[in-house]
Every structure is written in structure tokens, then in C-alpha cells.
Amino acid sequence: MSEIYLGNPNLKKANTPIEFTQENIEEYLKCKSDPVYFAMNYVKIVTLDEGLKSFQPYDFQEKLINNFHDNRFNICKMPRQTGKSTTVISYLLHYVVFNDSVNVGILANKAATARELLGRLQTAYENLPKWMQQGILSWNRGSLELENGSKILAASTSASAVRGMSFNILFLDEFAFVPNHIADSFFASVYPTITSGQNTKVIIVSTPHGMNHFYRMWHDAEKGKNEYVPTDVHWSQVPGRDEIWREQTIANTSEQQFKIEFECEFLGSVDTLIAPSKLKSLVYDTPITQNAGLDVFEQSKENHDYITTVDVARGVGNDYSAFVVVDITEFPHRIVAKYRDNQIKPMLFPNVIWEVAKNYNNSFILCEVNDIGDQVASILHYDLEYENLLMASMRGRAGQIVGQGFSGKKTQLGVKMSKTVKKVGSLNLKTMIESDKLLFKDYDILSELTTFISKSNSFEAEEGCNDDLAMCLVIYAWLVNQDYFKELTDQDVRKRLYEEQKNQIEQDMAPFGFIEDGLDETTFVDKEGDRWYTDEYGDKSYMWDYR
């Protein structure tokens, strides 16, 4: 065993003969069958206080390793500084040493983080006894290959980083910190290659970071809606962490930060538009239909009024083109459908809006017309000839005023997202959601609101997050405050109220001169003895309209 790899005395070169003692054979077989025993007796880690030392897993870490070994899909919600990465690395080292021709992917939100995790595994590998090591074929910062055909790749969590590759194990580290649009595209492109095998594994480990893709997968796992085995670790399971430690940690950070990082609560970011307590109480549900970016929670209902608000992206892959459909028939308003897609071209987006809006009783549409949005609104108005497209006109100090059929140089086919519009819309949205005047059950909306934060006297998405649906809601909340919206809905509400309470209204009005003589349902006699024919004038609702 004198041959070493590239001058590293701790590594064994491939094709180096090994002489096993009987004790070596027994230990090898014992380690192969028991990954916890292997971790406790042969894995070395580097600590800040003690340097290189043997890994002595806590009880919950032993449980985690056994779960990884026994189950194909694992998701773990863990506090900071609990050795979660070390635990997984220990199992992955066991997996590549004792299994031939397997591929392992170590993926993190940043490629540098993934390479650092691989570095920890390489350190542990270097400190294995030579008789246990596999010979080295390749040993790099981003990958390694062993003599038994097993490989490990370290990369960022993105579809492009691992597209076209197949893995026996995928380890997704701090998955809650991967932006939603990346997480969505990752699972859409990579996951089919994982599920195609019979023994492939996925290990997802993270501290919560808002109500994002990780949040959704965790709660689906808890409810049994997916195949993942959930493991929840509490900070008190780490030896040495007690109430005194808790108080000191809060004093050095904050109560909010402690709840997120150590209590593992799925709270939003700091300084969110919507109060964290409200965000925490909101729940999402599965849409009744899903198709090509459109999620429907309620089908269109007869005699209901709807508003569709639109936010337009360039269709380059990061931002989403989005719209929400809101039932405004009565309070509380309800979001009945939403669309979100980061691949659709602006030229095609109007057709999607048109189809959905027509289905929802020719819904009124208000489109954001900054930049490319103006093109979308123009296609809706001129090419598709959609009648219920709301316009805005500049009225001096009053700012943008919404209506229909405006004309003049200062009129646009929608609303420009100015600082004033954004501020008014954001504050109205906060009031409406926190007072339960706007209801929704969409996961993507909830996710965006948990990272829609205060920045420079405005509100926008946290770095690396999206706010396209949130901006649709901001536009809606601004519109609700417009006089035109109030007039429109008040008129409709009056009509519906009359129909619903027609008999009661007529009874209440009788003492003031309206008397039914029973001769004909289409006529009535007033106190002066004059007969009125409702066939000519319609029902008495006109009296309600003109009171």
C-alpha cells in the first residue's frame, strides 16, 4: 500500500493491492451494514474548538442517518448549528465507499457552498484507514471519482447544473434558500430522472426561510401528500442548549430571528408588508384545476363580477408574467384564479388573459403598462377588441384616474406603476388582507407575500425572490380605492341587493304609498289611485336606483 495519489499520503491510488486482516474484514462488513456505526468509529470532522476529531453523533443525528438509509425520500427541518450538513456528509461518504458505480449530487443554493460541503467529505475520506478506502481516480474541488466507479458532483441547485445527468442520491442543502423560480424549474427537469430508479434517494435538509418551495414540500410531507419522510429537530435536542442559552441567543439577535433560525417557524422575512402573525395564519389549498400556469380555485359563477389585474414580464426566465382574477361581487373579495409563467412571450400573453377574462363573465381587466405591459394592453384593446379593458387618465394632482373609454393625450390602456400607485396599493393591500377583506388559498401568492418587504420607502421582493403576483395584488388594491371602481361595484351591488330583498323592500315601501290590489302582478295602484304598469317600466327596481 505504498502507492499514494498525487503525492497525498492520506489517499490511496487506484489499483493498489490491499491485504485485509480478519479484523479488517469484520469491521468492513459491520460498517457496510450499519452507517451509524461507521460514522461513530471512522468519520473525522473538523471543529472550531478542537480541530480534527471523531464524529460523535447526537441521538437525533443517529436517527437521521438511519432514516436516510431506510427511506428513499427524506425532508428535514432543522435549526442552525445542529450539524445537519455533517450528518448528511457522513451518510454520503458511507454510500459511495460501500456501493459500486453510484452517482451522488451535493447541491446547495450557491456552487461555492456545495464545493465546501464536498471538501468536508473529502477531509473525512482522507482520514479513513487505507484498507477501507477505495482507490482515487479523480479528486477535484467540484467532484471526485473512486475506483469502485462511484462519483460525487458538487454544484448549485439549478436545472442547468445537473441537466442530462442521473443520480442515485441527491442531497439538497439549505433548500429553503433556493429562489422559488429556480426550485420549480429544478424539480420539473431533474426530478423525473430521480423517480425513474427503484432505489434512488433524495435528501432535503434546511432551516426554514419563509413560505417557499421547501415550506410547501414540508407541509405536504406532514399531511402525507408526498413520499417524503419528515424529520423535525428542535434546538433543545442539542446538548448544552437550555433556556439560558435561548435567552442569550435572543439577546444577541432578536426574537423574530430566533423563531426562524432555531424554532424553525415558517415566518416571512423581516419587515414584510403583511404582518408575520397574519402570514403565519394563512393556509394554501390545491387548485381544482391546473394547466400551463393557470390555477383555478373557483369556476365562474352567473351574475358574479370579476376583476383581472395583470403584471407583465419580458419572458426571459426570471420574472413571471402574471395575473389574478378576483371575485368582487361582495366582501370579502376572493381570488378565484391566478396565472404565472416565466416562459410565455409578451406577444402571446394577451391571448391567455383574453381567454380567462372572457370565461369569468367578461371580467374587467387592469393591466400594468410600464415598459412591455403597454404592448400587452394594446393587443387586448386593438387586436382582440376586448371591451372591458380599464384605462387610466392623468388628472394633475389627482394622479391616475381609472375609467373606460377615455380619450386624449394623457390616457393609457392601463395603469403605470408609479411610486404613488405602489404606495397606495401596498397599504390598501395590507389593510385588506389583515382585515380578511381579501381571501385566497394560493401557495405562490402566500410565498411571495412572505418575501415582499419594505425597501427604501417602498415595497418589493427580497433579493433573489419574486413579487409578480404580489404586484398584481397591489394593482388590485389600488383599483379598489378608485372612485370608478366604487361606482361600478355599488351599482351592481344595488341591483343584486334589490333582487335578493325585493319582497322586503316592497313591504317596507307600502306604508308610503305603494299598495298591491291583487288584480294583476304587472300593475300596482298608488295612493292617488293611479295605476302603474310594470310591463312598461320594468320592475320597481328603477325606484331603488333613483332614490
Image (cartoon, rainbow, N blue to C red):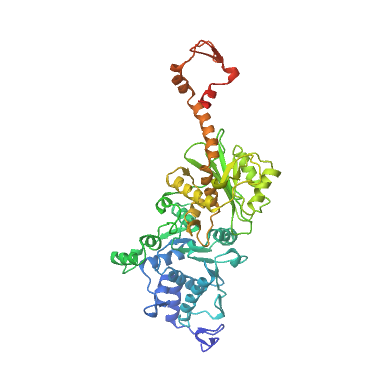
Position of 508 relative to 484 (above/below): above
**Quadrant housing residue 299:** top right
Q: Can you give x and y, in whole percent of width and height, for residue 308 in the image? A: 58, 44
Q: Residue at x 46, y 42 (%)?
A: 437
Of residues 192 and 21, the one nearer the viewer is 192
Of residues 141 and 169, the one nearer the viewer is 141
Q: Can you give x and y, in whole percent of width and height, for residue 267 in the image? A: 42, 56
Q: Residue at x 54, y 32 (%)?
A: 491
Q: Can you give x and y, in whole percent of width and height, for residue 358 in the image? A: 63, 39
Q: Residue furthest front?
A: 396
Q: Residue at x 51, y 83 (%)?
A: 11
Position of 199 relative to 422 (above/below): below
Q: Is residue 288 visible?
A: no
Q: Residue furthest right?
A: 383
Q: Is residue 316 visible?
A: yes
Residue 408 is left or right of residue 439, and the answer is: right
Position of 217 relative to 41 (above/below): above
Of residues 332 and 211, the one nearer the viewer is 332
Q: Residue at x 61, y 38 (%)?
A: 362
Q: How many marks?
A: 0
Q: Can you give x and y, in whole percent of width and height, for residue 58 in the image? A: 36, 69
Q: Residue furthest bottom?
A: 2
Of residues 362 and 487, the one nearer the viewer is 487
